[in-house]
Image (cartoon, grey):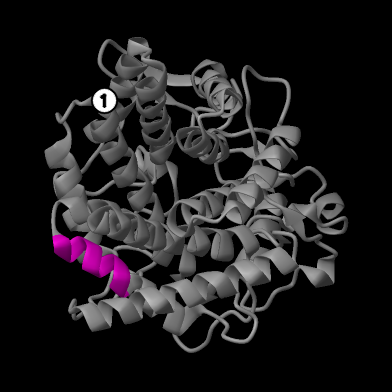
Amino acid sequence: METNNKSFEQVIKTVNDSLDAVLSYSQRNDYAGFNKYDALASPILLPLSFGNKNLRLFYSQAIMRSPLNLRPLFAIPRTRNPKGIALFAMTYLNLYLARKSEKYLQKAEELLDWLAQNQSTGFPGNSWGYQYPWQDVGFFAPPNLPNRVVSYFVGTAFLNAYEITGKSLYLNYAIGVKDFLIQAPKVLFENDKMKCLSYVPDESINWVVMDVSALCGAFCARLAHFTNDKSLIEEARKLISYVVDKQTDYGAWFYTHPPTANRLKMHDNYHTGYILDAILDYLDFSGDDSFLENYRKGLQYYLENLFLADGTPKWMNNKIYPIDVHGSAQGIITFLKAGRFNRQNEEFAYRIAEWAINNMQNKQEGFFYYQKGRFFKKPFTIMHWSNGWMAKAMSEIIRKYYVENRATTN
């Protein structure tokens, strides 16, 4: 992509317009919508699963993979997703920094208040999960069972709010999230140098999902930056060390460890981005650059194997379709963060954004489509998966552009 001032300004205008459109759509729908794994929210399908794991998994996969949106047929409700609400809150915080309008801070704080009032219960600290029952290969989660991934994103929204406003309330919520991440069951592995945490707090589950420990490690390192709690740095290093230890010799990560624990023996797009961002956050907030080469190697793999040259996100390293809009969003975020190492990384983030806007956004309604197959798009959106993620990604571009521009001209 050209980077002269005129073409760059056009990119920023395109991103601004696209972001305003998707936020307008999301606001009109009160940030509520269908969810990727919400099949068992159906009052029809859940009873028909008879408590059987395989039936629950079949229904979940069938609804998720269908080329048509079958959710209305099975009376699956539109709901607010805590991770999605966190993503929209982070979007508005970015816009507050970029556009200097109090209305964005107000919107962010309203969403943060909703999160504070809609926590999961029964475990240490502050935690969030999905509002519907869902079945994964490795476990079944009843409604509102907290998990470390959702809690990480909500905690990050609170930390962002604390960094911007200085309100101790938000820092206290983030500390509570740390308590859940570290204290809730279950530690799957630990020695003097490494540590691995479970996805959900269940003593019976031994399923290792690689991005979980990476996200928890990144959160601990960032929280240590604000609290000066040195013990969190050691905690973070052990968690990140475990993940780095499982990196392949060619720079990639499998979704699970061992790889055979998951039926997909490939490397997927957005989980790779999660891990890369987590390692970079650890490097930034810990001051420990031990894993810098692992990050660089992983980023190179991500670029060369999980995207096409025009910015199209691949589904897996060896499979393009279905193209998932979450891959676009994650790519924007990851390569924008990596722009500090190479201007071409930042330019690639803009290329991904342009591709997603041109190919995955409904120009009349403003929403982003969920997935695109070889011959057609799935004609519907998933609120947090499609719109929350793309709003967050594009707001990162806008924040970087306006904040840096303002700093240059002052």
Whether 143 is among the magenta residues is no
For the point 74% across and 36% down, the residue is 118
Q: Where does label 1 land, which residue?
A: 286
Binning the other alpha carbons within 10 Å of mark 1 as few (below 14), some (14 to 19) or many (20 upward) gives many
The percent coordinates of residue 148 (x first, y second) are 53, 33
Amino acid carrying label 1: it is: Ser
Find the magenta span and give its range: 343-351
Q: Is residue 336 visible?
A: yes
Question: Principal SS element in the magenta part?
Answer: helix
Instruction: From this view, report whether residue 362 is shown above or below residue 306.
Output: below
Q: Seen in the image, is 114 located left or right of residue 220?
A: right
Residue 323: x %, y % from top left: 43, 73
Percent coordinates x, y for residue 184 in the rendering = 57, 19
Query: Quadrant of residue 71 in the image?
Result: bottom right
Q: Quadrant of residue 204?
A: top right
**Residue drawn at point x = 46 percent, y = 19 percent:** 187
Q: Secondary structure at mark 1?
A: helix
The C terminus lies in quadrant:
bottom left
Q: Indicate the position of residue 231 as horizontal and vertical percent values.
A: 35, 10
Which quarter of the figure is the N terminus placed in?
A: bottom left
The vertical placement of 143 against 62, above or below, is above
Q: Name the residue nearer the viewer: 301 or 99.
A: 99
For this orientation, the residue located farthest to the front is 410
Residue at the image point whose x is 65% and y is 81% from the top: 365
Count of marks placed on residues: 1
Q: Quadrant of residue 309?
A: bottom left
Asked whether 253 or 6 is in front, the reply is 6
Q: Viewed as shown, does residue 22 lie left or right of 222?
A: right
The residue lying furthest to the bottom in this view is 375
Figure check: 141 above or below 68: above
